[in-house]
Image: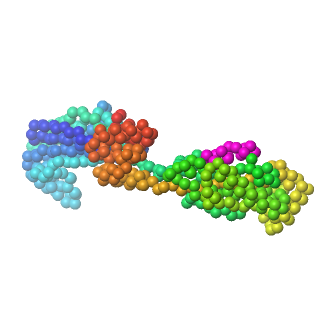
Amino acid sequence: MRRYITYLLLLAAPLAMAQTVTGVRLTGDGAAARDGGATYEVSYEISLPQPKSDYSYTVTPVFRHGNDSLTDTPVTVRGRLNAKKLRRATVLGDAEAPMPPYIKAGEDSVVRRVITVSAAEYPWIKGGNLTLCTRIEGEGCCEILETRYVCGDSFRCPIPFVPSVADVPDNTGKAGLLERNNPVLRHISQYKPYNSTRILRKEEGALYVFFPLDKWTLRHDYRGNAATLDTIVSITRQIMADTTSSVKVIQIVGLASPEGSVARNNLLGQNRAVALRNYIQSRVSVPDTAFELCNGGEAWTELRSQVEELDMEGRDLLLGIIDNEPDPDVRERKMKRLNGGRTYRYLKDNVLSDQRNSGYIRIYYDYVPDSAAAVINKASALLRREKYQEALDTLEPVRHDTRSLNAQGVALYMTGRKEEALNCFRRGAELGDKQAKDNLTQLTR
């Protein structure tokens, strides 16, 4: 966006001239500019008078702010005879020499310029009280005219409005909101079927409940189960009650430690998964079809992963037994005999309780697509391309969605409806929209 500041200076002929400052605008990222990393684009116009045929003059634009100044490239205007003499002198001096640049008298002598200025070198330009001055040096057929300085009234370079626009997140329903603080939740697109190669203990946010040794009765008061079970029930109940999201799969894996026979441990794994499902269904109405019960049986993969991280006697030998003995019952007997039983005793005291007592759960959800977010983000893309009226038209169907307030504000402001824009920014800022707050700050400081 540009702001226009105009003033006019008239001098006595032949050096009469008008100067117009058309604005100062910041380019690049606004945050970078505040850090001194951007540039300014200073645009202005100088309307040059027509010299007599045998005269020329040179005008040098200078922006001043207190003791600071910025000098731009001079511009020269030459009358017809003056230019002819210059060409003759140039050829006689050096036929190959280029002619110095100038503007011919009689041509359009309005000079429009945009100069790029380093923010670090000239920080005083943005928002400063500036004066555009011109140093005028002229010459004629028989004289060199007195150098003159002409300055206009001081003006303040406007701090430009650099709209802050960001896409709004897809409204993923209650489940999507809950996932932010409960990584046990995953969108159905991230669903992974269970197999024995998965290391469940390393999966972020998955929850475990625990069972007493050789039991599949699920106790609320056992080993911190209360907090976990309450979380599972609360999450499931909230999603089931929400019309914009739904539970698609509740994946439960029942596990047992390698202690005891394979047959017994498989029974424990299956019944522990069933027990957790029954606990949830006793408190929330969830159909059987929403559950995926997996019998993890003996948790060898979990055990190996945990042993690998330990600094314990016989660790490498133990890993060798787990990796190379195919029969799980024989594998367990070899483990018990290792190092006279010391390694196995350490496992029983420090490791096996995490496998022998565990049931794993992951909840996958889906949600109703957020069509309003798609419309708002389409409008935001138009705003970045400076298609402001098109963005405003695009936002019309979702104007009552508070997430669109910032985009509406930008579109309104850029199409000249400033009071309406400020109202949108104020409402958005009150609701916690960071971009709306930033835009409001820019326009009211």
Q: x, y (%) of residue 429?
A: 41, 38
The image shows residue 215, relative to residue 156, as above or below, that is below
Q: x, y (%) of residue 289?
A: 62, 60
Is 428 positioned to the left or the right of 288 in the image? left
Q: Residue at x 84, y 59 (%)?
A: 260
In reply to whether residue 222 is colored magenta, the answer given is yes
Q: x, y (%) of residue 182?
A: 60, 48
Instruction: Using the image as rendered, state which of residue 322 and residue 390 is in the foreground.
Output: 390
**Image quadrant for the C terminus?**
top left
How is the structure coloured here?
A: rainbow
Give the farthest residue toward the bottom: 326
* Residue 47 falls in image quadrant: top left
Q: Main secondary structure of the magenta part?
A: helix
Residue extent of the magenta highlight: 220-235
Give the farthest residue toward the right: 340
Q: Residue at x 71, y 63 (%)?
A: 196
Q: x, y (%) of residue 180?
A: 56, 47
